[in-house]
Amino acid sequence: KNPGEDDSKELHLPKPNEFIATNFNLVMEKKDKKKEGKNGESATATFPTKIVDEEGLTAWHKTDDTFFKPKGHVFISIECPQINNTPESVVLGQMFVRATEESLSEFSYDAEISGLSYALTLTKKGLQLTVAGYTHKLHVLLYKVLERVKKLSIEKSVFERLKERIVREYCDTKRQQPYRHAIYFQSRALGAKKFALDSTIEAARKIELGDLEAFASTLTINTDVECMVFGNFTVDQAKDIVAKMKSILKHKPLPPSLRAQLRCVDLAAGETYLCQRKGMNEADVNSCVCALYQIGGETYPMLARLSMICHLIREPAFDQLRTKEQLGYTVFSLPISINGCWNVLVIVQSPSKGAKYLDDRVEAFIAKYRKDLEAMEEKTFQSNLASLIKKKLEKDKSMGQEGTRHWGRILFKDYDFDRREKEVAELKKLEKKDILDFFDRYIAISSTRSKLSTQVFGKDRPIGGGKEDEEKAKEKAEGQQKGDKEEEEVELPPVPEDPAKKVSIDDVEEFVRSMNLYPCFLR
């Protein structure tokens, strides 16, 4: 039976998928790698080159000369410092990202099956958009996302659903692992723009649709935009993309007075700062310590020494604190940059020990490792150094990995695209004495060390450790025959005396206001 006239109007073929690529030609062939590229650009260029430099807009380009695939990435940073000004603006920023993603759901499936993807995220300075996939149709998805960023429309029902989800996620933050809470407290103490969790939850509950609409309408009026077009693109194609992006955003440059100033607290030499808090989850028995040793601003000699120190202590720290002392499953050490200021961070989380005890065990390990480092044979030191250099010089495994590496230097605004080579050049100059001097100055107990110990105490653990924890630590350090049988078999390194002045951080905001700050490394 033939369908009736009314039924036939409801039957139709799906719309053509506008994201499906049909042109897979490469703008640079392998055989042309050493020749001059089109439009005068160097086909052998290793690093991105600046193609647009205007007030409020900077653009970079690099043609893929390594992977030779018809794919690419467009990275865009949209500086909107108002996103991080208040708890309300932080919530509105997150809701803006979620609402934009929701509005793009009608395109996202077609784009995904066509080999295209996008990611819109919040950063310390505003928004970041990354679009990746086949270059023939990548611009189609890019423009659609930018149009929604510029002009967002959201229904009341969608807003209420997103609001409920965000409030729930903020509340669930209190049930995260204690080491995550410790990192949060630590970040606030060092001046990062993170607001009290309860204030943010309260702000999320009060947000209305009109607040989000007003926020979205002004978000990109005044902003600084920086982008990189990377992959299977010529210079002319990249310039066309940037010009279209500019016409969509229609933004004005951000006034210098409104630009984000990301700075870090300068911890005084010879002092130990204690940020001690109860765990957010009252039922969690785990305690945690984040022991942070501040190094300072970035230089290549410093980076070389920092990389080598962290390379050397990573496995011994895990072996001593996790395997031998069995403090807990969460034990790791790493270099970490906070607003451009570098630090060494050691994290230990334990279900059976208090945070004060964990901090003592970290100090005991550091004192022990100082002796091990001094006794290390030159052959072993050189072997570790060679291993680190080899790791630094590993080739990028994908186009995305290479693009992200270059984009990181653009975000940091130092444009040091040959960073790896410069680090390796400094590493090759290192001697064991350099590492010992660095260790003594910044990590071992000394009058030049700056330490922040962030301690989160679990259920039934009083803040500060209490007399019971102190006695346990002392007994363990002295090797007394107490505790259970399993613990008796482990000979623990003694806890060294720390003559440093102890400064307790009770009010984080007052503490940050009272401290000196490093210069703004992230411009």
Image (cartoon, rainbow, N blue to C red):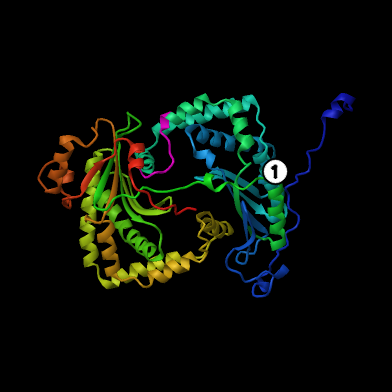
Give the residues in magenta: 189-198
Q: Amino acid at mark 1?
A: Lys
Q: Which quadrant would residue 387 be assigned to in this image? A: bottom left
Report whether 404 appears left or right of 104.
Answer: left
Toward the viewer: 516 or 393? Answer: 516
Residue lying at 66% horizontally and 38% vertically, measured from the top left: 104
Q: Which residue is mark 1?
A: 144
Give x and y (percent) for residue 228: 61, 56
Toward the viewer: 285 or 196? Answer: 196
Give x and y (percent) for residue 411: 53, 54
User: Is residue 216 magenta-colored?
Assistant: no
Residue lying at 15% horizontally and 45% vertically, measured from the top left: 476
The residue furthest bottom is 35
Residue lying at 23% horizontally and 59% vertically, measured from the top left: 369
Toward the viewer: 90 or 177? Answer: 90
User: Is residue 193 magenta-colored?
Assistant: yes
Residue 234 in view here:
no
Give x and y (percent) for residue 203: 48, 28
477 versus 442 height, above or below:
above
Q: The N terminus lies in which quarter of the figure?
A: top right
Residue 189 in view here:
yes
The majority secondary structure of the magenta stretch comes to: loop
Q: Secondary structure at mark 1?
A: helix
Give x and y (percent) for residue 316: 28, 57
